[in-house]
Image (cartoon, grey):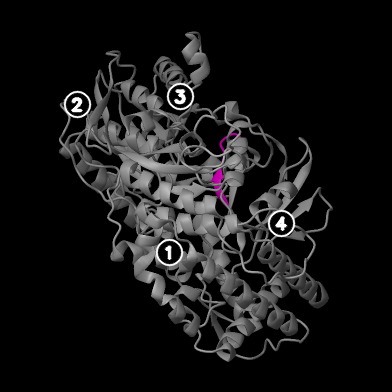
């Protein structure tokens, strides 16, 4: 096994970007081919890969899992959720007919038996054709939007329909809701019908073109993601696309996309790209339409595959693309928003840390504050290996800190909001700017071995008052840095609980294990029976966990803020802890380190008391708190009206509330004075300066 591990291609990342190019099917076409009734069948190669991947994950995944009936049942539920999570195609009798497979998936994985997933998918395709024919007949008839009826948008909350007639009524409401959404967005009746007919024809073409590979990838991911949410399998074509995307410079909007149900969703916003600089989009927003130039017609892309959506979104540098987005945080039935973007290459040099000196007057005193925004932890590894000058987060922040000292700043805020991570080396080195030396993070492998990563440079670049601002999307390297600052009592952590991703992934090319070297023989088969012409795809698996120097894992819990600012998120609905299969939080032995005296319990209590007083007296903070409380209520509402007047009122009220929350809580890139959260962090820094004096 040692030799096997030496052959692993390691793609170490802290950002969690792996898997963002996955999709269930390939080669979407705008045409509508005839529906294919022929059953899909697994290949011998897929059966071999199933066996090998199961054994490989059993040996090398961080989480030791047991292949038993309980595990089998979880895989089965994940698989059914992936196939028909909306309970919109199968009926109750179909699901009951599949129950014979529930407890046997563990044996199937070890034996390379793919009978169960292919039986499910083949029936699903037939059920889809039945739904498609019914939907097209619905679109030929008008809907009455004066009737007072409602629709449950979260179909996972509902039971499986007991009959085809019951499912027909479900789809009547689904289609009626879609027509009403387009109508309220200003679409004319004829255009609405045409849009939806095209959409459903595309979906039929998508289902018709499914291959055995797509079924296999779906099932393997239902298995791998039962172990943990960051472990998955990519079929050869998906793996090839992933490698291209990770290595090439692409002209477009600067985002990684993936399919989520019927939508193309923004999985990550790439620092330095047009979306990043625009600052009005967040992860999980869904793209519903694309238009070329300032005057081009809108192309509905609901139901498209990621590959085909990318073809519309990418284009020549300097050209305009417009996109319609359904905000990921918007309640059901909300309107879309439109963005105008100029395509360009992602410029990572524009995603570097930025620093400025901000004047502030508080309690009759004038302060000069240094504010540093770090969008990611970057490091030019190639130039660093050559031994010359190279760009890095630590170098840039050190330069700002030196400038701040020369300008006589009273304290520093480091803004880590939406920083998904990056280089572990930089997280360690950046911590070193604020401490003399010592351990920063611990890493534990799947065999229980623990490595302690330390700052060994005794230079202390900045020892003044320090505030770290984070939000729910601050992850991985951000959490390592913030956690170390908190553990050393070096600064105050302000904002929301961080994401909680405390795991490390490795990428494994299965071809390296399943393709033995060719011999002089004319036989094309290897000694273990694998075809040299075949390709076997890639596995991404979790192999390590991070731990703070206190011994506490960052997994699930992340870093808790010392001063908790208002948040729209419940930890259980956003972040690592929202994933059912996320690895657990645990603890290991504490590292040997020495805390500073910068943040005493007395100082922290004073800061918290002053913040609590502002919560009661500051008009903006009170408004934000009230808006967030109301927003949390409405965003959990999944039952929407199909009455036009009531639906319009729901949309208007929800959107007004959502915009108010976004304006107050996150601000806009070109108007930092509107960023209430950053402003409050600066006030907290002033309180810290005062308390420490």
Crowd tier of the residue under label 1, counting other residues whose Cα lies within 10 Å: few below 14, some 14–19, many 20 or above = some
Residue 144: x and y, percent?
A: 70, 89
Q: Secondary structure at mark 3?
A: helix
Mark before the other along the chain sequence, 4 or 2: 4
Q: Secondary structure at mark 1?
A: helix
| Residue bearing the label numbered 4 | 28
Query: Which stretch did the figure color magenta?
Result: 266-272
Mark before the other along the chain sequence, 3 or 1: 1
Q: In the rendered view, does 270 fall on the left or right side of 70?
A: right
Q: Are marks 3 and 1 in contact (CB under 8 Å)?
A: no
Q: Of tags 3 and 4, which is closer to the observer? A: 4
| Along the line of sight, the residue nearer the viewer: 423 or 65 | 65
Q: Of tags 3 and 1, which is closer to the observer? A: 1
Is residue 271 magenta-colored? yes
Mark before the other along the chain sequence, 3 or 2: 3
Residue 318: x and y, percent?
A: 77, 36
Q: Secondary structure at mark 2?
A: loop
Residue 149: x and y, percent?
A: 58, 88
**Which label sits on residue 78?**
1
Question: CA–CA distance between discs 3 and 2?
Answer: 24 Å
Q: In the rendered view, does 142 fall on the left or right side of 625?
A: right
Q: Of tags 3 and 2, which is closer to the observer? A: 3
| Residue bearing the label numbered 2 | 596
| Along the line of sight, the residue nearer the viewer: 672 or 321 | 321
Mark before the other along the chain sequence, 3 or 4: 4
| Residue bearing the label numbered 3 | 393
């Amino acid at each position: 096994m040692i030799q096997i591990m030496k052959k692993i291609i390691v793609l170490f990342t802290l950002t969690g970007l792996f898997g963002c190019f996955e999709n269930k099917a390939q080669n979407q076409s705008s045409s509508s081919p005839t529906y294919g009734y022929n059953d899909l069948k697994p290949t011998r190669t897929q059966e071999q890969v199933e066996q090998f991947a199961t054994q490989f994950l059993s040996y090398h995944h961080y989480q030791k899992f047991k292949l038993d009936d309980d595990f089998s049942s979880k895989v089965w539920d994940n698989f059914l959720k992936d196939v028909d999570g909306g309970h919109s195609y199968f009926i109750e009798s179909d699901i009951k007919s599949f129950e014979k497979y529930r407890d046997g998936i563990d044996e199937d994985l070890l034996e390379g038996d793919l009978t169960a997933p292919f039986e499910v998918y083949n029936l699903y395709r037939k059920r889809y054709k039945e739904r498609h024919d019914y939907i097209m007949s619905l679109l030929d008839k008008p809907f009455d939007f004066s009737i007072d009826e409602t629709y449950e948008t979260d179909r996972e909350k509902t039971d499986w329909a007991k009959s085809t007639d019951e499912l027909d009524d479900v789809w009547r409401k689904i289609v009626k809701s879609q027509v009403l959404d387009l109508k309220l967005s200003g679409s004319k009746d004829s255009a609405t019908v045409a849009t939806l007919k095209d959409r459903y024809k595309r979906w039929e073409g998508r289902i018709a073109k499914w291959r055995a590979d797509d079924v296999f990838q779906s099932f393997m991911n239902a298995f791998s993601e039962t172990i943990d949410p960051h472990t998955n399998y990519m079929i050869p074509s998906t793996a090839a696309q992933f490698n291209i995307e990770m290595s090439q410079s692409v002209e477009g909007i600067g985002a990684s996309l993936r399919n989520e149900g019927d939508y193309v969703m923004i999985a990550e916003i790439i620092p330095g790209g047009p979306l990043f600089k625009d600052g009005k989009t967040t992860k999980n927003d869904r793209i519903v339409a694309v238009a070329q130039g300032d005057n081009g017609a809108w192309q509905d892309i609901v139901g498209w595959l990621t590959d085909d959506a990318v073809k519309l979104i990418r284009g020549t540098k300097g050209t305009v693309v417009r996109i319609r987005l359904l905000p990921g945080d918007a309640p059901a039935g909300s309107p879309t928003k439109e963005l105008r973007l100029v395509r360009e290459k992602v410029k990572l040099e524009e995603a570097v840390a930025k620093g400025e000196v901000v004047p502030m007057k508080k309690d009759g005193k004038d302060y000069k504050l240094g504010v540093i925004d770090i969008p990611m932890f970057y490091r030019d590894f190639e130039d660093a290996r050559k031994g010359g000058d190279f760009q890095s987060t630590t170098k840039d922040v050190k330069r700002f800190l030196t400038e701040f000292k020369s300008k006589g700043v009273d304290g520093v805020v480091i803004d880590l909001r939406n920083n998904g991570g990056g280089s572990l080396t930089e997280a360690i080195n950046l911590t070193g700017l604020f401490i003399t030396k010592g351990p920063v993070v611990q890493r534990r492998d799947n065999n229980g071995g623990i490595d302690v990563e330390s700052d060994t440079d005794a230079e202390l670049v900045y020892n003044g008052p320090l505030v770290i601002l984070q939000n729910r999307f601050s992850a991985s390297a951000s959490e390592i840095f913030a956690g170390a600052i908190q553990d050393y009592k070096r600064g105050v952590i302000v904002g929301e609980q961080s994401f909680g991703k405390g795991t490390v992934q490795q990428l494994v090319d299965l071809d390296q294990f399943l393709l033995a070297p060719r011999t002089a023989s004319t036989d094309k088969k290897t000694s273990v029976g694998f075809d040299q012409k075949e390709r076997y795809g890639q596995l991404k698996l979790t192999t390590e966990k991070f731990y703070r120097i206190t011994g506490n894992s960052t997994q699930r819990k992340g870093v808790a803020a010392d001063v908790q600012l208002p948040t729209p998120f419940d930890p259980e609905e956003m972040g690592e802890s929202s994933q059912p299969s996320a690895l657990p939080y645990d603890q290991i032995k504490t590292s040997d380190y020495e805390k500073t005296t910068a943040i005493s319990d007395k100082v922290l209590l004073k800061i918290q008391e002053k913040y609590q007083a502002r919560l009661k007296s500051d008009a903006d903070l009170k408004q934000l708190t009230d808006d967030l409380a109301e927003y949390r209520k409405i965003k959990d509402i999944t039952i929407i009206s199909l009455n036009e007047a009531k639906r319009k009122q729901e949309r208007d009220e929800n959107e007004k509330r959502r915009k108010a929350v976004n304006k107050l809580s996150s601000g806009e890139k070109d108007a930092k004075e509107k960023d209430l959260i950053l402003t409050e962090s600066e006030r907290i820094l002033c309180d810290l300066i005062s308390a420490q004096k």
